[in-house]
Image (tube, coloured by chain):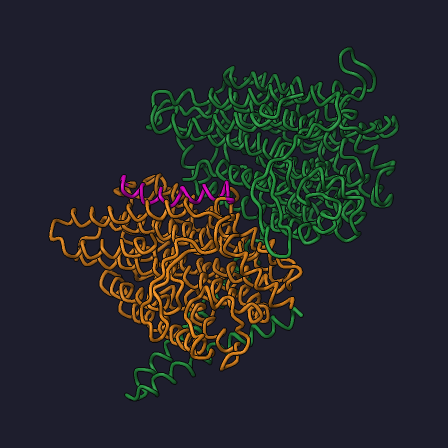
Amino acid sequence: MLPEAAAWLIIGLPLLAGVFNIAVLRPWRRSLWQYAGYVGIVGTGAAFVLSLIAVNGAMGSGDAGYEPHAWFAVGAIGAQDGFQMTVGIFLDPLSAIMAAVVSGVSMVVQVFSLGYMRKDEHDANGEWSDYPRYFTYMSLFTASMLGLVLAYNLIQLFVFWELVGLFSYLLIGFWFHRPAAAAAAKKAFIVTRIGDFGFMLGILYLFLNRGEFTALGLNPFEIPAILDAAPMLSAGVATWVALGLFAGAAGKSAQFPLHTWLPDAMEGPTPVSSLIHAATMVAAGVFLVARLFGLFEESATAMNTVAIIGGFTAVFAAAMGLASNDIKRVLAFSTVSQLGYMFLALGVGAPGVAMFHLFNHAFFKCLLFLGAGSVHHSVHTFDMRYMGGIRRWMPITYLTTLIGGLSLAGIFPLAGFWSKDEILATAWSGAHAANTGVSQLVFWLALAAAFMTAFYIFRLIIMSFHGEFRGGIDSVPHEERIPDEAHHQVHQHESSRVMTLPLIVLAVFAVGSGFVANSLFDLGPVPAHWFSHLLHEDAPKFNLAIAATSTVVAVAGIGLAVLVYGTRTVSFDGLGRLWRFAHRLLVQRFYMDALYEDLIVRRALYRGLFLVSDWFDRRIVDGVADLAGWLGRNSGRAIAQLQTGHIQVYGVGVSMGAAVILIFYLMQR
Amino acid sequence: MLTAITFLPMIGAALALAVRGSTRTTRLIALTTVLAELGLTISMYVIFSAEGDVYQFVQRAPWVSAFGIEFLMGVDGLSAPLVLLNGILGVAAVLVSWRVETRVREYFMWLLLLQGAVMGVFASLDLILFFIFWELELVPMFFLISIWGTGRRDYSAMKFLLFTFLGSAFMFAAILALYFSFPAGERTFDMTALIHKDLTNLIVPSSLVFSGFLVAFAVKLPIVPLHTWLPDAHTDAPTAVSVMLAGVLLKMGGYGLLRINAGMFPEELARAAPLLATLAVVNVLYGAFIVMRQTDLKRLVAYSSVSHMGFVVLGLASVGAGAAQLDGTGLNGAAMQLFTHGTITGLLFVVVGLVYDRAHTRHIADMGGLSGRMPLIAIGFMVAGLASLGLPTTSGFAAEIMVFLGTFPAYGLATALCAFGVVLAAGYILWTAQRTMFGPPLERWAHLEDATRVDVAAMGVLVVPIFLFGVYPALLTDVFDAGIAPIIASFAQGLGG
C-alpha cells in the first residue's frame, strides 16, 4: 500500500508544479517560459504514476484510509465538548481509480496544450506568453480536483470543491479580454455556487444532527464515518443531507435546472473544455454522489430524485445538442446529457456502473473535444456551417474523432457500448432501485437519449468532416469573428504531432477501456469484471436483448443523421411549422437562459428588488437621517430641542425597520 | 506592554507633527512607527497564551479614585487578535498614504492618533477608559475625512460624527446606570469585575442598559437601519481612512457587542437573539441587494461591508439556542468574522484606492480591461474579492462556516437566508471584477501604471493573514476560544440557574 506521504504527494506534486510556474518561472525567467508546460506535465505525470500505484495497492486490500489529522477545533468550551475538524486522505478503490483518471487525462490534455496554446509567430508578446499562466491554472486545477477526490472529511472535500470552481473560473475566463469569456466564467461560478448553497445547507443539516454521530463515537464530517453511520441515522437526516449534497452535485455536473453554465463555458481554450468540462470537474458531482452513496441509499426520496433528474437531463440536454451549429456546444450538451446518464445509474442503485461510464466517458469525450480543438487549429472557427470535407487534410483527427463518436454513440465493441449497456440493463432490471417504476421510466429516457446521441454526434462528424469544404474562418462574416482571431486564415494541414499523439492515445482508450476494464470473461492479466469488483460491486448481467435493442437504436440514430446530412435524402423541412417551432425551441435552449438572465436576474432582481432596495435606502432610510439633521439645525437654538429632534425622528426610521423585523420574527416562530 | 502598544502611535503622531523635515522624513517616521507597532502587537500575540489567565498583560493603576475610575488595561482571547488586526492595518494604511501630498505632517499625525485610539479601545478593561478612547477616535476621523476627503466630505464627516455621537450618548447613559446601581462601596467601572456581578437587578431595567450599549455598537458595526453614515463616510474618506474604517473601526462595534452585551448581559442577549437573527438577515440580504445597484466602487465595497457585518450579528444570535445547546462556535465565528473582514475589506479598499490614484475615477462604468494594464493590482483585487465571497483557503470561508454551523441549530431559516448572501456575494464580486478588471483593454487607460513596490507591500501585508488564517484557522480560533469561554460560562450560569 502507498505510504501516506506519497498519497499526499498525489495532490502536492501538481500543486508544486503550479506554484513553481506562477511564482518562479513567470516573474523571473522569461527565457524559460516555453518550458512551463513540461513542468506541469511532469508534476501531473508523477501524480498519475502514484495514482496507478494506489490503484494497484487498493485492488487486493479493503479500504485503505489513513488516520485523519487534527485541523482546527471549534467550540471546545462550555457545556459542549466542542468539535474537532480533521483532514486526511481517504484512499479506497473508488478514489484511487478516480485519481488515476483525473491525473491521466490531465496529463494527456497538457501535452496537447503544448501545441494548442502556442501562439502564432506574429504575436507581439511572443509565442510562449500564455504558457506560464495557463499551465499554472492547469496544474492547480488538477491538484484541487485530486484533493477533492482524496478528501477524508466532507468539509475538506468542500474546500477543494470550491477550489475546483475557482480554477475553472480562471480557466474559462483565461482570455479575460474577451467579454464573452469573462461573462461565461462568471456565470459558471455563480450558477455552480447556487448548487453549492444546497451543499452548504446539507453540511449544516448534518452538523445539526451531529448528536446521532457523537452517540456512536463518530465525527459527523468524516466520510467513512458518514458511510458507517448512514444505516443508523433517523429517516429525515439522510434525505435532507443527501438532497443538499445532490444540489451541489447538480450544479457542478450541470444537471437540470443548473445546466445553463456549461455550454457558455466553452468560451475557454478548447483543451480546458476537454479537461474540465468533459473529464474532471463536471464529473465531480457524480463522484460526490458515488462517494457518499451509502448515505443516498438510505433515502428512497433522494435516490428517486437523482434518477429522475439524471434521466430527464439526459434527454433534455441531448435534445439541445441536436440543433446547435457550434461544434464545442454540441459536445457540451452531449456532456450534460452523458452526466445525466451517470446520475441515472446512481439513482437506480448502481454507483459502480455510473463510475464505469464516467471512466469510459472521460476518454472518449476528452478525445472528441481535443479533436474539435485540432480542427479549430486548421479552420479557426467552431461553426460547423463553415466546415465540411476536413477529413481530406486531417486524416488522424478525422479517424480519432470518428472513433470517439462511435464510442459515444455506444456501438459494439467500443468503450461507450459497455458502460451504456450496463446502465440500461441496471435500469431495466431495477434490482437495486428504490422504486421500480422510476427505474423503468428512466430506462426509456435513457434509450431515447441514446438515439439522440447517435444522431447528433454523427450530424457533427458529417457536417464538419464530410462533404465539400465551406471555407472555415475565411467565410465567417467579419462582424461574427472574435477580434483575436480576425486575422487568422485557414491552413489546410494536419495538426502537429504533439497534438495528434494525445488523440491517438485517447482513441486507443476510447476503443478498449470498456471491454478491457470490465470484460465479460478473463483477459490474461485482467480478470473478468475487474472494474466492478474493484469497487466491490457485482457487474450487472449482460442482457443480449437490451444490448441488441440499444445497438439498433444507436444505428438508427446514425442512419438518420447520414440520410439527413450526408446523402440529403431526408429533410425535416417537410414537417413545416411544427419543425420550425421545435427548432427554435432547441436553438433557444428551451428559453431557460432567457428565463434566468432576462426575466429573473435583469427584470425581477436588478430592475426590481435591487432597485427598490437601493431607492428605499437612499430616499427613506437615509432621508430620515437627513431629515433628523435638518430638523436639528432648524428647530431652534434650544439644545434640548435639538436632542429630542434627533431621537424622535430617528425613532421613525427604527420603527419602520421594526415593522419589517416584526413580520420576520413572527415567521420564525 | 499594552500601554506601549497604545501610546506608541501617539508618540509617533507627535513626532510626525513636530519634526519639520521633508515629506519623505514624515513618511518614514510614520512607517517606522507602524512597523514597530506591528512588531509589538505580533510579539504580544505570540506571547499571549490561550491556556493562561483569562486576562493577560494586565496593568492597573488608580486614576480618578473618587469615582473608582482606573487606568486598567489588559487583553483576553477576544481582544488580543483585534489588537493584532489594528497593528496590521496600521501598516497598510500608512503605505497606502504614500501619495498624500497635502499637509503631510498633520495627515500622518491624525492617522497615527487614530490607530492609537483604536488600540486603546481594544486594550481597555475599564469602562470609562474604554469610553474615552471610543470618543477619542472620532477626532482624527472627523479631520481626516473633512480635510483630506473628496466629494461631499464635510457632510460625510459631520454625519459620521453625529451618528457615532448619538450612539455614544446611549452608551454613556448605560455606563452610568451600571455604576450607580451598586451601593457606594461596590461601585466600579472595572469590566473584569462587572462580568462576575449580578446585573439583572439594576436601578433601571437591565434591558434598558443592554439596549443602550446595543444602540451604540449597532451604529458602529453597523446594523441596518443605523448604517447610512457608512457609505457616505467611506466614499468621501481618503483611502487610508477607508481602510481603517472598514478594517478596525467597525470592529469596535462587534467587539463591544461581544465584550459587553454578550459578556455582561447573557440573559438579555438570549432574549434579544430572535431580533438579532432577524436583523442579521436584513443586514446580509438588504446590504447585498443594494450592493448590486452601486456604480461607485467605494460605495459598492462599503455596502458589501454592511452585508458582511450581518454575519457577525448572526453569530451573536447563536446564543438563542439555549444554554444546553450552546457552544462557542457561533460567537467564535462572529469574532473571527471581525478579524477576517478587517483584512479582506481593508485589502479591497487598498485596491480601490490604488485604482483611484491612477484613473482618478471610481465610476465602474468608466472602467474595464484594467487587468491588462495593472496585473498586480488585479491580483490584489481578485484575492480580496474571492476572500470576500468566502472562498475556502481564505479566512473569509473559515469565519462564515463557523457562524453558519454555530447558528443553524438556533435559527435554521435565518441562517439559510444569510448563507444565501454568500451566493449574492459571488454575484456582485465577480460582476464587479468583470466590469472593472476584465474585458478588452480601453485606450483611455493605456497610460496607467501597475502597483509600485510600496503598493505591493500595502497589499501584501493584508494578503498574508488572509491566507494564513484561511488555511490554518486554529491560529485565531484557539485564541478567540479562550476569550469566549468565560462568556459561554456566564451563559451557562445565567440561563441554566
In the image: residue A559, left or right of residue B430:
right
When the figure is inspected, residue B224 is found, relative to residue A188, above or below; the finding is below
Judging by colour alone, the chain drawn in orange in this rendered image is: B
Give the residue furthest to the front: B185
Residue A552's x, y, as percent? Answer: 81, 28
Residue A409's x, y, as percent? Answer: 72, 28
Q: Colour of chain A?
A: green
Give the residue furthest to the top: A524
Residue B466 on the magenta segment: yes
Identify the image quadrant of residue A418: top right
Q: B197 or B303, which is in the foreground?
A: B197
Residue at 79% from the left image edge and 46% from the top image edge: A304
Q: Secondary structure of the magenta portion, mostly?
A: helix
- Residue stretch in magenta: B452-474
Quadrant for the C terminus of chain B, please. bottom right
In the image: residue A522, left or right of residue A407:
right
Q: Is residue B104 visible in the rendered structure shown here?
A: no
When the figure is inspected, residue A561 is found, relative to residue B97, above or below; the finding is above
Q: A414 or B223, which is in the foreground?
A: B223
Residue A91 on the magenta segment: no
Q: Is residue A215 visible in the rendered structure shown here?
A: yes
The total of numbered circles placed on residues is 0
Residue B346's x, y, as percent? Answer: 38, 52
Residue at 79% from the left image edge and 33% from the top image edge: A423
Q: B182 or A365, which is in the foreground?
A: B182
When the figure is inspected, residue A351 is found, relative to residue A115, above or below; the finding is below
Residue at 31% from the left image edge and 71% from the top image edge: B64
Residue A277's x, y, as percent? Answer: 59, 35
Identify the image quadrant of residue A2: top right
